[in-house]
Amino acid sequence: MVKKTFIIAEVGLAHEGSLGIAKSFVDKISEAKADAVKFQIHDHKSESSIYEKFRKKFSFQDKNRAEYWKRTQFSEKEWHHLIKYTKSKKLKFIISPFSIESFEKLKKFNVDAWKIASGEFTNLPLIKHIQNNSKRPIILSTGLTYEKEIEMILARLKKIKKKITLLQCTSIYPTPIEKVGHNLLDHLRKKFKIPVGISDHSGNKSSILAGIAYGADMIETHLTFDRKFFGPDTSSSITFDELNEITKFNREFYEIKKGKVRKDKLTSQQKTMRKFFCKSIMVKNDLKKNQKISIKDLKFVKPMLGISALDAEKIFKKKLTKNLKKGTFIKWSDLK
């Protein structure tokens, strides 16, 4: 069955705690015709300790990760508003919870899918809690995971296998395109027999286009308004202009895959064009009845009104049944 790649535009925390900026992301993602928008929900009390350091020190405002998460968080009321706003723009709403407590804040709202980030893949208590308390699909990102751990987690989620998508991911920011892991898509699909895709951190349009061409069921990519935009994920993100190009390619590539062109038959349009472009056999000079045909007497010209040039060798040494004037197309009835 031919399917179109499902494109998720990841905002993460690029909204910087501003509901207005978050809605602006949703607006632009909707205009670009992606399929879904994804955010992250963090609870510093539940997911971190004083020993956790910044992966990348980028903020003068925040002394530590906990302060960053507090500054960028939304209230439940704001989340509810953002979810409804996203739905009004015809987008699916996907979220990455980083703790059971974060999941609990949003489970009562109309979330379309739960995304398990690479760092949470081994957080079995979180994944099992989501499985037991939500009927929504689960998307698993594998950026920091051994294959044996993938096997173990999927075995524990066997009851909801039809609702799981597995994403190849390489947790390097940004990821060099040769390390994104497009080559693993076929392997993961065949081994686990579930939909597979890519969570892309390359910030490179070519990587995402390649993912579509490789047959990814789903691709997630970070978005930024500008590559100079503030934030830790900007270097791993694509712009909205690039997203527009990607979604356009995705739609057109889907039409290409659906196409069933045959070479054993020609369409009526092709048959018409064949008459315009293919060549027939015409006589160069006046020829007499009973004269034998040789190649020096012929030329091969458009349109196709007589015997095809493909059959030229079949008429050599045949005799004419009548006189033919220069510039006449030869017909089979003219030969014996």
Image (cartoon, helix red, strand yellow):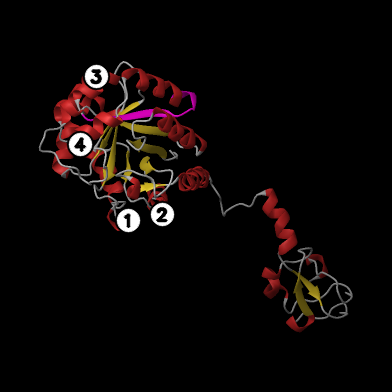
Q: Distance from label 4 to label 3 (Cα)?
A: 21 Å
- For the residues bearing labels 4 and 1, Cβ distance under 8 angstroms: no
- Residue 298 can be seen, yes or no: yes
The residues colored magenta run 87-98
- Which numbered marker is on residue 104? 3
Toward the viewer: 319 or 115?
A: 115
Give the mark, 1 or 2, whose residue is nearer the N terminus. Answer: 1
- Residue 134 can be seen, yes or no: no
Q: Say which residue label 4 marks.
A: 65
Q: Is residue 94 magenta?
A: yes
Q: What residue type is labelled 4?
A: Arg
Q: Position of residue 80 (x, y in %)?
A: 37, 19
Give the mark, 4 or 1, whose residue is nearer the N terminus. Answer: 4
- State the SS at label 4: helix
Toward the viewer: 220 or 314?
A: 220
- Which numbered marker is on residue 206? 2
**Can you say whether 172 is above or below 314 in the image?**
above
The total number of labels drawn is 4
- Quadrant occupied by the N terminus: top left
- Which numbered marker is on residue 177? 1
